[in-house]
Image: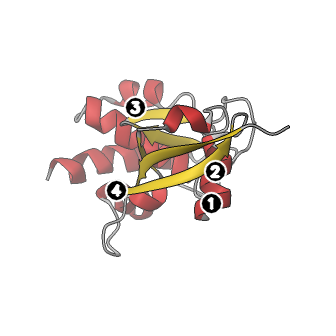
Amino acid sequence: MRHTRPISFTLNGRLVTVTAATHETILEILQRDFGLFGARESCGQGLCGCCTLLVNGTAVSGCLYLAAFADGAELTTVEGLAHRGTLHPIQRAFVEKSGFQCGFCTPGFILMTKELLSRHPHPTEDEIRHYLSGNLCRCAAYPDIIAAVKRAAELVAE
């Protein structure tokens, strides 16, 4: 017997309601019901950062975060950062500084950067490295990612 329940949350600024099984993760719901594939499951253990989402402004691992916990919350995905076709300053900084190679991990890094800059608008390089230490880039684009975060801090401050 499959147990489901309706959940409502604000997704990228829009109130939505879905039916979720009690065991489903928010990542599964976002992909299945909304076609949002920016956050990706890679490790399935919350260790790599590829599935990062913001829930009420705090970064979470979407592969571990049960959909039921999102009821009443505000969720932001990488797709929700751009506004009317214009990239968010953090997204622009990652493009400008080539803060990616294959791009698989990039959405997670971008959302972690958003949380970082909301808490520390002018982070030091050590703070950036520490804050992003839970996100893995298998291509090892770390120097460009650090440069992108520094540039993002400048753009967000403008």
State the residue position of label 2. Answer: 29
Image mark for residue 33:
1
State the residue position of label 3. Answer: 128
Q: Do the residues labelled 3 and 1 touch (CB within 8 Å)?
A: no
- Measured in 3D between alpha carbons, the distance from the residue under mark 3 to the one under mark 4, in whole angstroms, is 27 Å
Of 101 and 156, nearer the camera is 156
Relative horizontal placement of residue 63, taking residue 87 as reference (left or right): right
Q: In the image, what residue occupies the spot 46% across and 34% down? A: 59
- Measured in 3D between alpha carbons, the distance from the residue under mark 3 to the one under mark 2, in whole angstroms, is 30 Å
What amino acid does circle 1 point to? Asp
State the residue position of label 4. Answer: 13
- Measured in 3D between alpha carbons, the distance from the residue under mark 4 to the one under mark 2, in whole angstroms, is 17 Å
What amino acid does circle 3 point to? Ile
Dot placed on the residue nearer the N-terminal end, 4 or 1: 4
Could you tell me residue 24's position as x and y percent?
70, 40
Dot placed on the residue nearer the N-terminal end, 3 or 2: 2
